[in-house]
Every structure is written in C-alpha cells, then in structure tokens.
Amino acid sequence: MAKVPYWKTRGELMQQMRQLGVATDVTNLELIESRPSSKVRIDAAGGTPETSIFDLDPVGTGYMAWISLTVVNESFAIAGFCLGLPWEIGSVVWLSDPANGNGPSYAYRFPGRHANEFPRDSVINHRADAQRILRHGQRIEGFLLGYGSEPIPNAYRHGDHVLGNIAVYDQFDEQYSAETDFCIDRSARLAVANRVRTPRKSLFGELVPSGE
C-alpha cells in the first residue's frame, strides 16, 4: 500500500501556510482534490424572518435558522450543531427537547418574556443524536433554535443582515458547514425603549417620563 503523503493528513495546515505566503510544493488544486467529499448538504433559508438573530427580553440573544440537511454520501448522524458570527458570541445553548421536560406545553420556547413558541415537529434540535443514523438520500428540515447571554453589538440595527456560519458535527466529529444570511431583529429592544419613553401621569395629574 502506498504511503499517504503527510500533507494530505494536515490539509488545513497546508492551507494556512499558503495564506501566510509560505512556499510549498503543494498546489491549491491538490488541496481541493484532497478534501473528503461531503456527507451532507446543508441548505439554509437565509435572508428571511425564519433565519434571524434577535434580542431576548429582558437580556440575551436568540438564534433561529430554518435549515435543511440532506445525506448525500453515506450514513450520517447528527452529533451536534455550531454557530459562527462576525462577533464573539460565547457559548450557544441549543434549546432542549420539550419532550424531556415537565412543562404544560409540548413546544420549544425561548427564555424571557413574550417569547415565541415552536411546535416540536417544526424543530430539529432533538434530531441531534450520534446513535441515530440517517441513510443516503434522507432529509430533515426545520428550525434550529439557540440562545446566548452575549448581546447583539450596538452597531447592528433592526433590519440589518449579517453573514454567519452554521455547522453540523457527525458521529465522527467531522464538521460540515454552510454560510447563512441572518436578519437582525431588535424588536424586543425597541419595545423596551418605547416603554421607557412613554410618559405616565403623576399623582397630581402631570405627565412625567416613565423612567423616573
């Protein structure tokens, strides 16, 4: 059996060397051809309200994406999800399966006030199970829902768009990702600001700012 060249086992290192301008005998075409074929195709409904980043009330950030996963190569299992954005988001907590809880509602729900609920059969969070094998050609789709404690940077306004990255890990810890266009939804923050600015009447009938 022919010995596999070392660079083929460290393709990501060779790519970094090329980006830094370090001379190598490995061509860019060889790097592309050496990459393993993808086991799954990820399609995200980018640029829509179903794929958004939004403020939670009173604090925190919600992450929502409508995605479709299609097994295109061989048996595949979803072991976990990952989200990348242009700013530091810390750890993302993926909403847990409501079927495992004791709540009255059989639906996913974000933390905080006035949070939307999502029927369990429209969400794919609970499909993450390294022991649950998906066969070639099988497809699942639905909402991927998560949240974090880090706020959306103030530079992003309501209605803006930002490019992010959604990744899926398989049972062998291999990562597959897709670039996704997220809408920025700051409705909760705007609602809080409006409540603070709304005047109220004092005991003497005079209008005073509600923040006083």
Image: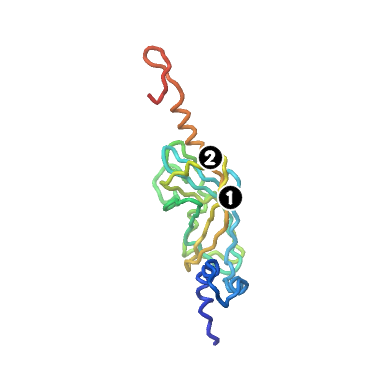
Which of 17/72 is in front? 17
Mark 2 and mark 1 in contact (Cβ < 8 Å)? no
- Determine which quarter of the picture holds residue 72: bottom right
Is residue 196 or residue 96 the one in the foreground?
196
Q: Which mark is residue 181?
A: 1
Q: How crowded is mark 1: few (under 14 residues within 10 Å), some or many (20 or more)?
A: some
**In the image, what residue occupies the spot 57% across and 71% down?**
36
Per the model, the C-alpha gap separating discs 1 and 2 is 15 Å
Relative height, residue 154 to residue 131 (above, below): above
- Residue at image position (55%, 74%) is 23
Q: Which labelled disc corresponds to residue 157? A: 2
Where is residue 157? Give x, y as percent.
Answer: 53, 40
Vertical comparison of 210 with 67: above or below: above
Circle 2 — which element? loop
The percent position of residue 209, horizontal first and vertical second, equals: 42, 22
Q: What residue type is labelled 2?
A: Arg
